[in-house]
Image (spheres, rainbow, N blue to C red):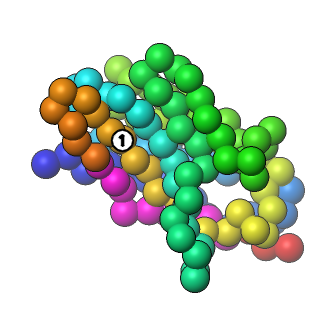
Amino acid sequence: QVQLVESGGGLVQAGGSLRLSCAASRSIFNINIMGWYRQSPGKQRELVAQITSSDSTKYADSAKGRFTISSGYAKNMTYLQMNSLKPEDTAVYYCRITTWGPQYDYWGQGTQVTVSS
């Protein structure tokens, strides 16, 4: 069973930066998409950013220009560089990796990001 482990969360002041990392417990083959989601209390989990195996990226409007997703497919890792953080970015951030042939959908347990004003 593959486990995804996020790290890099924490408490930061508004305007600050954090870099989240997601590592898989073992090699994952046929990765399709690696992504970051977040969920704050009372809200649905939402996509923040994703990157495909062909390095195509997609960002939520709230993340554009501030966050950057990258991947290390050879090492089965993905990163989320978050700059100019705002209090509304406060949430639990989750890593997700999906595969093709066969299709698997892996989620991490999340890392808390808290941005103080």
The picture quadrant where one finds residue 39 is bottom right
The picture quadrant where one finds residue 53 is top left
Quarter of the figure that contains the C terminus: bottom right
Q: Is residue 75 left or right of residue 88?
A: left
Relative height, residue 28 to residue 47 (above, below): above
Residue 4 visible from this viewpoint: yes
Residue 8 visible from this viewpoint: no
The picture quadrant where one finds residue 99 is top left
Residue at (52, 31) in percent of width and height: 51
Residues in magenta, as a range:
106-114
Q: Position of residue 4 (x, y in %)?
A: 32, 49
How many marks do you count on the picture?
1
Q: Position of residue 54 (x, y in %)?
A: 47, 17
Residue at (44, 62) in percent of width and height: 110
Q: Main secondary structure of the magenta part?
A: strand
Q: Position of residue 66 (x, y in %)?
A: 78, 43
The residue carrying pointer 1 sits among few (fewer than 14), some (14 to 19) or many (20 or more) residues within 10 Å by Cα, namely: many
Q: Is residue 114 left or right of residue 108?
A: right
Q: Position of residue 74 (x, y in %)?
A: 35, 20
Residue at (58, 82) in percent of width and height: 42
Residue at disc 1, secondary structure: strand
Residue at (46, 57) in percent of width and height: 94
Relative to the observer, which residue lies in front, 93 or 60? Answer: 60
Is residue 109 found inside the magenta-colored segment of the image?
Answer: yes
Q: Quickly name the residue at label 1.
A: 97
Q: Is residue 106 left or right of residue 110?
A: left
